Image (cartoon, grey):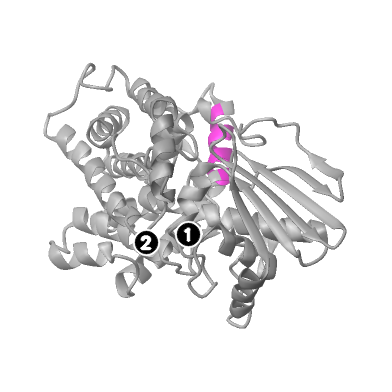
Amino acid sequence: MNGKEHIYRDYVRILREELVPAMGCTEPIAVAYAAARCRDILGAMPERCCLTVSGNLIKNVKSVIVPNTGGLKGLEASVAAGVVAGDAEAMLEVVAKITPEQQPKIKEYLDTHEIRVELANTEETFYLDLQMWAGEHTSRLLILGYHTNIVFTEKDGEILFRSGVSNGGESGLTDRSILNVQDIVQFAEEVDLEEVRDVLERQIAYNCAIADEGLQGQWGAQVGKTLMRLYDSNSPEIKARAYAAAGSDARMSGCNLPVVIVSGSGNQGMTASLPVVVFAREKKASQEELLRALVVSNLVTIHQKTGIGRLSAFCGAVSAGCGAAAGIAFLDGGRYREIAHTIVNALAVVSGITCDGAKPSCAAKIAAAVDAGILGYRLFQNGQQFYAGDGIVTKGVDHTIENVGRMARVGMRETDREILKIMIGQ
């Protein structure tokens, strides 16, 4: 990227920051991580805990099973898992090494100790404040902005760490506002794959493994299996939808296989990657072609999510479905023009899907988002497109992405509040 060396370096860093492994839905796992870390700070098993979180965490933890807990759900279970058996050093794989012998102890702790959960009075979409007590000792930990971003720790009233971040800004991460579709395509063509091969190949291995499990096991609503059973299972379009949905089927229902996430979400990580893998296999593409297409799909997904935020009332599968379609277009030889129109066409179709929390039906939303992304690409291949002035579509793909971000981040703020009220019965 002549004259854009700083962009090249930042794009490599963004991929390495985003494509990290996690076991289970990332919000309950973030709570378990916080609990394990806060327990370590306390230096003892807490007698009681108080967790104060933003509404989006309540929304995304309520209905998913925490892996390796024997089927437990909810914020209290996430805290208990982290306290009793969590490995804080493993971060988003904090519950990965919980043994069958430890699982009853998690349930016992949950039943015999006070774990109070409160809704935070904050505009932050990702806010997690955890306090613990053991005898005369106390500990406290605060996470803001994203799942592992600890900005404050305290023991017995003494501040151990304060980051200086007073809001949910993604402190310590590379600036995502540098992303744009034209540079993403150029970067994908020119990147030295040895700089990102490990994270991309891990994404393929982990996400394909959990998709295979979703198609073979009895997980969730079996959206992936249903698609393969009722439709043409030889069609790459159906396979793409089914594989991405099957991964979510398993993950939302407590499967203990890890995934590689994108923008803090395993569902988005699977949606952005698995359809591209399916199409690459169908085309018998080389490993290099697949990896470069995954660079496109991941960065296009991250680009869209930058303006939306990690958590919102806007379903992140939409962004990832568009990202996957961009990667598929790249596999077919499409470059900026084809990819830009694919993204705009797809966003014109599915920008109204709301996020009402993590749960089994996420798999169906993923299938719909992948379908819309592929439709956006097929429309352009057949000479059709949506134009500036068609709703939120405007001239220029990056400007349309900005419009979606504004709608999701600002316009849907009250929608987010109402969704939460409905979910908790207010």
Alpha carbons under labels 2 and 1: distance apart: 9 Å
Amino acid carrying mark 1 in the image? Val
Percent across and percent down for residue 56 are 49, 43
Q: Are marks 2 and 1 in contact (CB under 8 Å)?
A: yes
Identify the image quadrant of residue 102: bottom right
Left or right: 144, with 251 as reference point: right
| Helix, strand or loop for the magenta stretch, by majority | helix
Q: Residue at x 68, y 67 (%)?
A: 113
Left or right: 66, with 140 as reference point: left
- Does 8 appear in magenta? yes
Tell me if residue 215 comes above or below residue 49 in the rendering: below
Identify the image quadrant of residue 364: bottom left
Q: Residue at x 26, y 62 (%)?
A: 223
Mark with earlier residue (2, 1):
2
Amino acid carrying mark 2 in the image? Gly
State whether residue 265 appears in this view: no
Q: Residue at x 17, y 68 (%)?
A: 229
Pointer 1: residues within 10 angstroms few (<14), some, or many (20+)?
A: many
- Does 144 appear in magenta? no
Q: Which residues are magenta?
A: 7-17
Percent across and percent down for residue 103 are 59, 77
Percent across and percent down for residue 283 are 24, 54
Element marked by disc 1: strand
Q: Nearer the viewer, residue 352 or 367?
A: 352
Q: Nearer the viewer, residue 203 or 117?
A: 117
Identify the image quadrant of residue 90: bottom right
Left or right: 178, with 90 as reference point: left
Number of callouts: 2
- The circle drawn on residue 247 is 2
Tell me if residue 105 comes above or below residue 381 in the rendering: below
Q: Which residue is mark 1?
A: 259
